[in-house]
Amino acid sequence: MPVNINPVLFEFGRFSIRWYGVLVAAALLISMLVTEHFAKKTGQDPDKVADLFVPLILAIIIGARLAHVATNWSYYQSNPGDIIRIDKGGLASHGAYILAILVGIPLSRKKGLDTWALTDAIAPSLAIGHIFVRLGNFINGELYGAPTNLPWGIVFPGTFTPHHPLQIYEIITSAILLGLIIAFFDRRKFKGQVFLLSLVYISVIRFLLDILRPEFRVTSFLALGQIASIVTAGGALLLLIILTRKYKSSQGKEDNHV
């Protein structure tokens, strides 16, 4: 199935607006509104949460771009002018997580917010961001998978055989994650549970999808993205174990007081 979608939405002489940039902007705007909604559910002051949006958005974009540039340095070393061209695509989710966490933790504490409760409010935006960004990747004709004979394989621009539409796979799995978050949010046992479970889910999906991605392998079978997924999932699982034990311990103390 050949696909030929123009990545440029509007063009005015030398100036152009690309679908990817519009979709990233839409993801950020929707994520702000959704985060504010779920922050209210966790008892956070929406005005204080809103104060974090600008620094967090900058951290997400900068972190994601730096991670992408670092993992594709051979290209950007020869094309330094493209480093800032995020409208053409190229955002790595793990870089976004790392810098957003490093920026968000001290800022949320400074504002007097409950950091773990805030992470749960942000969790739906993880899925929303993946949906919009991967749609942008699909329109750009990038980040597709290995060649396939499956009936839904797509012939992307610049290729001659059908490939796995990994962008579509991730859009579908992210939509499922968003549904799970919404269904589970009000039933979470402790603060941070939704966020950490979301990180595990995203990391597992990314690890599995990267098996189908024809990219450089750091080891004989592991790509850099898969290593980052293992680290992220491992860290999230460790924190889940710690917080679960604290929750069970607090529940035990409450039962003893009854």
Image: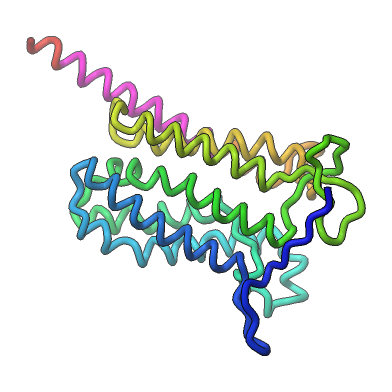
Q: In which quarter of the image is the C terminus?
A: top left
On screen, residue 118 above or below 255? below
What secondary structure predominates along the stretch shown in magenta? helix
The x and y percentages for residue 32 are 36, 57
Q: In this view, does 17 lie above or below 100?
A: below
Q: In this view, does 228 lie to the left or right of 121?
A: right
Q: Does 170 appear in magenta?
A: no
Q: Is residue 242 magenta?
A: yes
Outermost residue, left side = 258
Q: What stretch is highlighted in magenta?
A: 232-253
Give the quarter of the image for residue 213: top right
Left or right of 89 in this view: 197: left
Corner quadrant of residue 140: bottom right
Which residue is rendered at x = 60% and y = 59% of the image?
Answer: 91
For residue 68, side relative to residue 220 (left or right): left
In the foreground, 229 or 30:
30
Where does residue 94 sit, x and y in percent of width and height? 55, 50
User: Residue 238 at x, y = what percent?
Assistant: 44, 30
At a point 57% along the width and 68% down the height, the residue shown is 21
